[in-house]
Amino acid sequence: GENVEQHPSTLSVQEGDSAVIKCTYSDSASNYFPWYKQELGKGPQLIIDIRSNVGEKKDQRIAVTLNKTAKHFSLHITETQPEDSAVYFCAASIIGGFKTIFGAGTRLFVKA
Amino acid sequence: EPEVTQTPSHQVTQMGQEVILRCVPISNHLYFYWYRQILGQKVEFLVSFYNNEISEKSEIFDDQFSVERPDGSNFTLKIRSTKLEDSAMYFCASRTVQGNTEAFFGQGTRLTVV
C-alpha cells in the first residue's frame, strides 16, 4: 500500500542553523505534498505544500523541494528559531483523491 | 479565522463502551475526514466523507467505526465497542473542495480506553 518514509525522527539544531527533513513516498500517482507542523496539544497545521509540477517552493524561511523521479521531497528551514521547535510531518496525496498519507514525523528541537 | 472545533478535548471510557467524538468543520467546507494518532506515532487516515457518504476508508476503519453528519454542521465519529488499542488522539479535518487541497485540522480529542 501507499507509504511515506520520513527521516530523521529527531533533529536537534542550534538557533540560527538550518534544519532539513527528508521524505520519500511510494505511490507514483501522488502529486500533492503538504508539510504540517504540530505543536504540543494541537492539531497539525499546514506550513507549506508543493505540487508535482513544481520542483521547489519557498516561503520566507521555509522551502520545500521535490524530486519526482526519485520520489523524494524535503523541507528546509533556515535561520531556525526556538519557536520552530515542534513535530513536523510530511505527507503525500493525490489531488482529487480522498486521503493523505503521513510520514512518521520529525521532532525538531531548536536550542537557544 | 475559521477553524475546525472538536469536542470533547479528552474522553475517558471503559473498554467495551461506545464513544462519540464530535467535530464542527469549517462552515463552507464539503469534505470531512477523521485521522488517528497513537501516542508518539504517525497520523493515520481513517475515513473521508463527502455528500453524506463515505468516500474512502482505511483498513483501520472496521465495523466498529461509523461516521455521521446528523445536522449539517456536526460531523461525528462513533466507536461502538472500544478496545484498549483505540486509545489515541483523533483529529477531524475538513476541506472546501478537492481541487483546493489544504485540509484544516481540529485540535483533536484524546481518547483513553481503560
Image (cartoon, coloured by chain):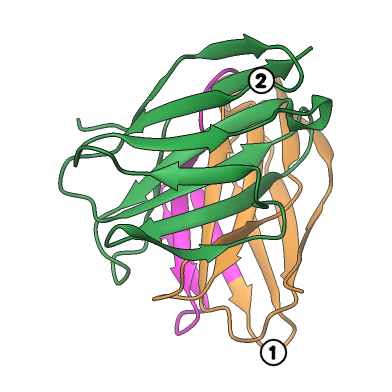
Chain colours: A orange, B green
Q: Is residue A51 rendered magenta in the image? A: yes
Q: Residue sitting at 37 percent across and 56 percent down? A: B102
Q: How many marks?
A: 2
Residue A88's spot in the image, x, y percent? Answer: 64, 41
Residue B83: image quadrant is top right
Q: Secondary structure at mark 2?
A: loop
Image quarter of residue B93 = top left
Q: Quick one: SS at disc 1?
A: loop
Q: Locate the C terminus of chain B by quadrant.
A: top right
Tell me if A106 is positioned left or right of A36 in this view. Answer: right
- Label 1: how many residues lie within 10 Å, few (<14), some (14-19) or many (20+)? few
In magenta, the rendered stretch is A41-65
Residue A69 numbered mark, or none: 1
Q: Residue at x 46, y 74 (%)?
A: A97
Q: Are marks 2 and 1 in contact (CB under 8 Å)?
A: no
What residue sits right under mark 2 in the picture? B17
Label the magenta part by its dominant secondary structure. strand
Amino acid carrying label 1: it is Thr
Which amino acid type is marked by label 2? Gln
In which quadrant will I find the N terminus of chain B? top left
Identity of the residue drawn at 54% across and 22% down = B109
Return the chain for callout 1. A
Residue B24 in the image: x percent, y percent?
30, 32
In depth, the one of B22 and B94 nearer the eye is: B22
Q: Residue at x 78, y 38 (%)?
A: B41
Q: Is residue B59 magenta?
A: no
Q: Is residue B108 visible?
A: no
Position of residue A32 relative to residue A53, above or below, is above
Q: Is residue B50 visible?
A: yes
